Image: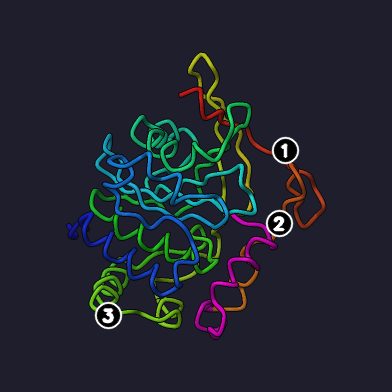
Amino acid sequence: MGERLTDDIIDAYCDKLQESINREVDGMLAMQYILLEPDSLKNLIRGDKNVCQVIYDHCRAHYVVLFRNKLIPRRVVVYDPIVPHKDSVRDTLNESVRQQILAMFGHLYGDDQAMEIAVETGLSTQNDCWSCGLRAVAFITHLILGVDPANYEYDLEKVGRFIMEIIKMEKPSREIIAGAQFGQHRGDGKSCLTVVRVTKDGKFEFDDETVPSRSADEKQKSDELLTDVDEAKVLESDEEKTVYPRTLHGDTVIDNNNNSVKEGFLLSHHFF
């Protein structure tokens, strides 16, 4: 059995990651802060930047990642490494996770506005009880770099070594973060989001859809974080440059064959 990361190590790594990109994203907060100081979050999460955050799911003693792209403000994506299919989404969106999502993002939406919560079910599945922290760190690093975690098979030993190396540095550079080698590209990997709506009577409704985590425009925006970084250090192969083969047009997803895919259900944040 491997060694489970602690909150302190994950928080320390996220601090270094923030420094390396000059705090160009929001989030990366100490996990305990989210529930201890929820009223302060509205001043820290203003919606004008992308948001990445590792949270601790108290119901399952488990780490997951929240990602909100400012170019798709209605959607918060949850990256949970132990969700292999849509039937597991109920476990992911438990009371602890919902509470923290609302604390982080609820103030960005009015009472008459809706928030999509999309759970990524295309990830390489965690089959142990200890690696969630390592995977969460890998997810959050790749999201900042504009790389889709669903396209990777992670080498947990490499991830662990990289974390400890970064923590020891006074201020890691963008180049060092972008050069992280976390594993290998999954040839059959693709993003598959299950978008959930919670109705007033407490029932969940699901709609499967295979969509990119970010559109081409969003990825271009993410790439702005990598100014002056050699693209070859970020993407391991030309194949990775096409990890988002489909683009978003309004509320419809258009694939490469010009086929429309219906968008998923909405989650009204005041129903919880």
Which quadrant holds the N terminus? Answer: bottom left
Query: What amino acid is at disc 2?
Result: Arg
* SS label for mark 2: loop
Query: What amino acid is at disc 3?
Result: Met
Residue 73 lies, in percent from the top left, at: 61, 46
Say if 213 sits above or below 112 in the image.
Answer: below
Which secondary structure type mostly characterizes the magenta part of the structure? helix
Residue under label 1: 262
Say if 269 sits above or below 163 in the image.
Answer: above
Nearer to us in this view, 228 or 5? 228
* SS label for mark 3: loop
Q: CA distance from mark 3 to mark 1?
A: 46 Å
CB within 8 Å, label 3 to label 2? no
Residue 116 lies, in percent from the top left, at: 58, 37
Which of the two labelled residues, at mark 3 and mark 2, occupies the earlier sequence position?
Answer: 3
CB within 8 Å, label 3 to label 1? no
Which of the two labelled residues, at mark 3 and mark 1, occupies the earlier sequence position?
Answer: 3
Numbered-mark total: 3
Query: What amino acid is at disc 1?
Result: Lys
Which quadrant holds the C terminus? Answer: top left
Residue under label 3: 169
Q: CA distance from mark 2 to mark 1?
A: 13 Å
Residue 261 lies, in percent from the top left, at: 73, 42
- Within 10 Å of disc 1 (Cα), the crowding (few <14, some 14-19, many 20+) is few
- Within 10 Å of disc 3 (Cα), the crowding (few <14, some 14-19, many 20+) is few
Residue under label 2: 246
Q: Give the magenta-colored segment's residue range.
A: 213-236
Q: Which mark is residue 54?
A: none
Question: Please, which residue is most extreme toward the top here?
Answer: 201
